[in-house]
């Protein structure tokens, strides 16, 4: 560990800077490697026509984001059970996204793994994460609401004995964590459709999560969240319009999983839904569009996810991105304020 642990705020801010520096230094080499190997993004044929020029832009930048996070945590944090679990959940979900990216590039199509294959992967990851959180990190299987209310999701719990080891399986909480982790991963993935959009929104949200973890006296988780923000800073230098690289599903799925993992480990699941409001809105826009078209044959939005709707209305890509950043910051601040209303 570097730095002075006697000043934990220093450690957290240092994590932002170190992670940003690592990502910014390594990314140009990774971009050249991806260009040399011909690894480029496949663009949706039914998307905005101006996006077709992005065809072939290097992707899988999430690999360097994750590398920056791991190296920063190795330098600054103590590897507590909570931190190990959060990092592993992020890396495994990122690996699922990497498989999706490789499949997409190999077959020259915008879609990689099938939805069922992704869902199976997310089910396995979220269930294992939840069981480890409850049995190793002693997370209470309950969700708390601002104002003092709470719901005990451990009422349906089964104990399994393996030798002298007792494993608690709170079925309702397992289901909730799956919905949270799979929902956040897919929501961030849907948001990753414009240059700098997902990276900027994740940056803001993770800064707030770092503040939550720090106030919760989980300095190592705060360093983890701060290192993700820093990596997004370094990434945005190359991902800002016009992007030189995309994070791919490797990055977007991993960032969503990291967000959900932090929410569970800091007991702020409900507040996290507010903080990540922009991701929720993007996902809802797709759900509403699909339901409306199947039920009535009409579309609610010009195109989904929502950021494409505003593009179709004539907004420039940079205007959409900056305004979504602003909305994301507002949601993140509101969620952070609600955090202090938890019992």
Image (cartoon, rainbow, N blue to C red):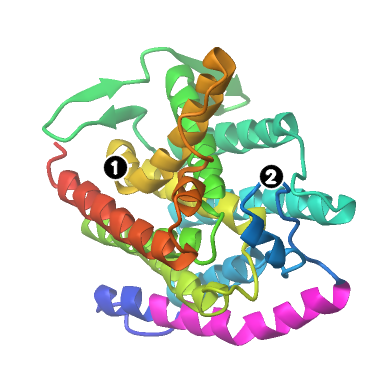
Residue 121 placement (x, y as % from top left): 68, 36
Magenta span has 26?
Answer: yes
Any part of residue 179 in sight: yes
Task: Tell me which segment is drawn in magenta.
Answer: 15-37
Who comes first in sequence, dot 2 or dot 1?
A: 2
Instruction: Name the secondary structure under disc 2.
Output: loop
- In the picture, measured across the screen, residue 222 lies left or right of residue 310, that is left
Any part of residue 78 in sight: no
Instruction: Name the secondary structure under disc 1.
Output: helix
- In the picture, measured across the screen, residue 17 lies left or right of residue 242, that is left
Closer to the camera: disc 2 or disc 1?
2
Residue 84 placement (x, y as % from top left): 52, 55
Res 228 label: none
Residue 5 placement (x, y as % from top left): 32, 77
- In the picture, measured across the screen, residue 60 lies left or right of residue 340, that is right
Q: Height in image: 85 above or below 247?
A: above
Residue 86 placement (x, y as % from top left): 49, 52
Q: Which residue matches tag 1?
A: 274
Q: How far apart are marks 2 and 1 (CA)?
A: 31 Å
Query: In percent of the image, x 59 and y 49: which residue is there?
Result: 253
Magenta span has 22?
Answer: yes
Residue furthest to the front in view is: 314
Q: Which residue matches tag 2?
A: 46
Q: The N terminus is located in which quarter?
A: bottom left
> Mostly what secondary structure, the magenta segment?
helix
């Amino acid at each position: 560990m570097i730095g002075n642990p006697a000043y934990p705020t220093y450690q957290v801010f240092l994590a932002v800077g170190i992670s940003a520096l690592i990502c910014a230094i390594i990314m140009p080499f990774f971009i050249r490697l991806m260009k040399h190997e011909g690894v480029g993004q496949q663009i949706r044929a039914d998307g905005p026509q101006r996006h077709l020029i992005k065809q072939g832009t290097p992707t899988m930048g999430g690999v360097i984001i994750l590398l920056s996070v791991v190296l920063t945590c190795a330098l600054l944090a103590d590897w507590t059970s909570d931190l190990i679990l959060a990092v592993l959940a992020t890396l495994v979900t990122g690996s699922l996204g990497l498989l999706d990216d490789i499949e997409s590039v190999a077959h020259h199509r915008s879609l990689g793994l099938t939805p069922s294959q992704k869902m199976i992967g997310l089910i396995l990851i979220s269930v294992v994460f939840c069981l480890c959180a409850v049995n190793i990190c002693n997370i209470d299987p309950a969700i708390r609401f601002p104002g003092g209310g709470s719901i005990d999701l451990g009422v349906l719990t089964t104990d399994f004995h393996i030798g002298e080891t007792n494993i608690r399986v709170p079925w309702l909480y397992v289901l909730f964590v799956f919905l949270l982790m799979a929902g956040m991963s897919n929501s961030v993935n849907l948001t990753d459709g414009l240059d700098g959009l997902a990276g900027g929104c994740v940056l803001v949200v993770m800064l707030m999560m770092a503040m939550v973890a720090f106030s919760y006296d989980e300095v190592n988780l705060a360093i983890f969240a701060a290192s993700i923000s820093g990596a997004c800073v370094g990434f945005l230098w190359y991902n800002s319009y016009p992007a030189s690289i995309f994070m791919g599903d490797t990055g977007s799925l991993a960032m969503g999983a990291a967000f959900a993992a932090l929410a569970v480990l800091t007991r702020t699941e409900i507040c996290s839904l507010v903080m990540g409001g922009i991701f929720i809105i993007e996902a809802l826009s797709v759900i509403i569009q699909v339901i409306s078209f199947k039920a009535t044959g009409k579309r609610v939005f010009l195109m989904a996810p929502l950021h494409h709707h505003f593009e179709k209305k004539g907004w420039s890509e940079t205007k959409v991105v900056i305004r979504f950043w602003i909305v994301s910051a507002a949601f993140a601040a509101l969620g952070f304020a609600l955090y202090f209303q938890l019992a």
